[in-house]
Image: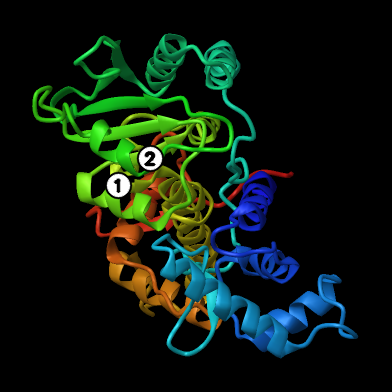
Amino acid sequence: MAHFLETRALRVAMDSWTMSPPSPNLDAAFSILADGKPRSATEIFEEGIKRGLFDPQRQTRNNIYSALSAYFERALGCGIKPFIVQDPDRRFRLNRPIDDWPAIDSTGLPPLALASAPPATAAPVIAALQSAGGSSDFDAFERAVCATFELFGFAATHVGRIGAPDGYADALLGELQYRVMIECKLSPIGRGAHTGDAAEAAKYRDAYHAQYCALVAASLSNQTTFVSELHAHGVAAWTIDDLVRAAALRLDCSQIRNLFAPGFAADGLDDLAWAQIHGPAKRLRVVASLLVEMGLEQQQVAHTLADGASVPRLTADVALSLVDERLTTAGSTHGVTREEIDAAFSWLTSPYVERAIWTADRSAIVIRPSTSSG
């Protein structure tokens, strides 16, 4: 988690076309909003004071509000996805799905965390990519990019001759296979891939029956026209750093398919990293943890009831109501879904977990008492 936050904070400070000069206020606000909960400028300021991120002698709530509002407007004006957005109620949040669920996890699984580096087996490929990206050897760069795509489960083919694409990659997904055209750009120092490169990246899509086009470069232009061209030609722009980050996140070709949508791949990478910590995996852990807690309470109550009294049953409908009530009490505005309840039931009763068992008619589950002394 820390790796993700530090990376994003650094990118916020480095995005010179959306903020110049870099803003400590934005970096501080980003770290405060990193838990996924929306906050007003006043709440951000007060939390920043508690954490020592703001100096009350030099900064005010209005300073924070102005910095965040100005950043949001500049990002939209440049046609890029802002990292922080403002809701209609004037609160600010990260430009991610809101995560206002409690941090409850008694599943016994390892804590959710992002990998900080690519797997060791990928190191030689990543080193070759970074070396080629800093050279003037176009052929070596093209081959290194194709080899990097294979880390994600693609079968990559380098072409690289005149009148042909640099390469293409086929996702090894059976009937879900898709093809990505690859265009590589080595640019003079100080100039990233620019407007005209988007059209070139899309040139061979139809001839090679590809669904997507990727433009890969050491750096990308910060011109607003470049963003427009990417969308006009249906091209995804990737940097070397983006490829390395995707490898560090241990992504495969099924997960990164959406990263080939027109625009900057970095935006989609941020979404995937967020989902790994705050998405379905966290929600399933919270639901399962609450079900175990409430199920055991319910069964204890059943034991104390007089003979003939109704025994509470943990059906999916009852679970949905109980979990929703508990989430609301915890301050969540986003309730649990029936699909999430069903998934938690399946997980708890699976032979790999065995934390719950189905009743005879499979209409409810019973939580197994823990016999662990730890």
Query: What is the distance, in whole Å, between disc 2 and disc 1 at their CAs?
Result: 7 Å
61 left or right, relative to 172:
right
Residue for badge 1: 230
In this view of the protein, can residue 299 be seen by the observer?
Answer: yes
Estimate how packed mark 2 is, as few (under 14), some (14 to 19) or many (20 or more) residues with alpha carbons within 10 Å. many
State whether residue 50 is above or below residue 5. below
Residue type indicated by callout 1: Leu
Asked which secondary structure carries label 1, the reply is: helix
Residue 281: percent from left, percent from top: 46, 50
State whether residue 208 is above or below residue 9. above
Residue for badge 2: 237
Residue nearer the viewer, 72 or 106: 72
| Residue appearing at x 24%, y 26% in the figure | 181
In this view of the protein, can residue 330 be seen by the observer?
Answer: no
State whether residue 240 is above or below residue 63. above
What label does residue 22 carry, if any?
none
| Residue appearing at x 40%, y 35% in the figure | 351
- Determine which quarter of the picture holds residue 43: bottom right
Residue type indicated by callout 2: Ala
33 left or right, relative to 290:
right
- Determine which quarter of the picture holds residue 142: top left
Residue nearer the viewer, 253 or 187: 187
Verify CB contact (< 8 Å) between mark 2 and mark 1. yes
